Amino acid sequence: MIIKKYQARTETEAIMLANEELGKDAIVMNIKTISPKGIYKLFKKPLVEVTAAVDENVSYRSDKLKALSQIQAQRARRDETEQEETYERLQEQPHNLTAPSAIEQKLNSLQSLIEKQITGKEKDDNKAMDGAEPEGNKNLSYLQLIYKQLINSDVDEKYANALLSEIDFSLKKELSMDNLLASVYQKIVLKLGQPKLITVDERRPKFIIFIGPTGVGKTTTIAKIASKFKIKDKCNIAFLTADTYRIAAVEQLRTYANILGVPLSVVYSSEEMKQAAADFTDFDLVFVDTAGRSHRNKEQRDDLEALINAIPEEDREIYLVLSATTKYLDLIKITEVYKDITDYSIIFTKLDETSTIGNIFNIRMLTQAPLSYATYGQNVPDDISKIDTQSIAKQLLRGQ
């Protein structure tokens, strides 16, 4: 499979570039708009990027057309260098969790809010008391405002209280605003923990099993993660699906399997899953899709548990896929039911469809299950990354 990206001013032009080089058999895998950043947005128009693929057995067009597309691609790359760094390079940047400078512009929006409200409070106190406020009262005011910001970000009250209680016990007198913000920020990052990511075991294959309710995006998430291991890491992967309740789900995964050039098998029972475990010993990773089960249906839960237990514990990793748009009370019920079935790590999807992400912090505190990946769109293989705990902490404190 040959996969390439093409950039042009319009979608039509980008697809034409793909067809000129890869031929009429090329398949468009993804289309996205790349907007100029910073000062460049004043002078440059957005570009459209098309990711296309073709079977490597299909011959290219003439050398002349290839040369033309290479020239056009070089121009597109030259334009691209004037824009912000790519997503992968951003992910590779080191982070400083201890210095206040690591907080994005000192969390300006929250700092501005604190300054305005504290200034107003000081004026009111001066009028009422005709003197300075008691020692330590300013720290308390800061904490109250941060608490309010966490609640506005949908953090559960009990977790917000617990978090700030820990901060409160460690406070020194006359703590500066920057240091207080840094303390809360660091505490949130530490509580979210290090992401649990999928890795390859050279000694034996791993079965990566995805579970979760219907409609949260399990199949698309599998395709995104599998594409990374197949294309970037050159791993030998395979697909299994036990989602036999929906024909569309099988066909969707089959489409991704064909594009990536990997095998797909359908299993209907725990016995067939055991047989698959024996048949797939030559692969690095086997990605297993499961049907969305109702957390209210005991029979379906039992079926899923039997399916999971068909794979030896040392050979499997379980990932519970949850939507960031699901109501908190429903998330509580879902995570509790699946916890009765198996231990898991958590993937959150649809971060692009919600303005508050307090539930990520809430579910992490409730389950203590490791966080893993996050998705923020439908594009395959893009719109996914390891969950960024620093970014979550900033958003919780900014309320954005």
Image (spheres, rainbow, N blue to C red):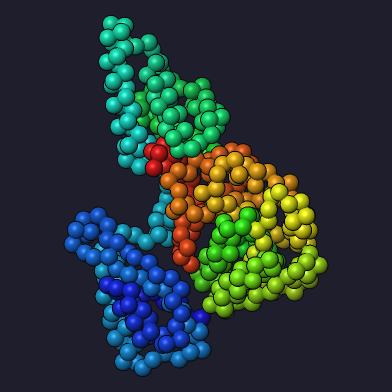
Figure quadrant of residue 279: bottom right
Residue 131 seen in the current view: no
Give the residue drawn at x 50%, y 84%.
Answer: 55
Check the image and name the residue furthest to the left. Answer: 43
Look at the picture and state if 212 lies above or below 395.
below
Which of the pair 213/318 is nearer the observer? 213
Residue 142 seen in the current view: yes
Which of the pair 219/189 is nearer the observer? 219
Figure quadrant of residue 331: top right
Query: Which of the image's four quarters has the C terminus?
Result: top left
Give the residue drawn at x 68%, y 43%.
Answer: 336
Which of the pair 129/164 is nearer the observer? 129
Look at the picture and state if 169 lies above or below 196.
above
Whole-percent x, y for residue 199 in the image: 60, 60
Whole-percent x, y for residue 351 in the image: 47, 52
Whole-percent x, y for residue 9 in the image: 27, 72
Whole-percent x, y for residue 246 in the image: 65, 67
Tell me if 107 is positioned left or right of 9 in this view. Answer: right
Give the residue drawn at x 66%, y 72%.
Answer: 283
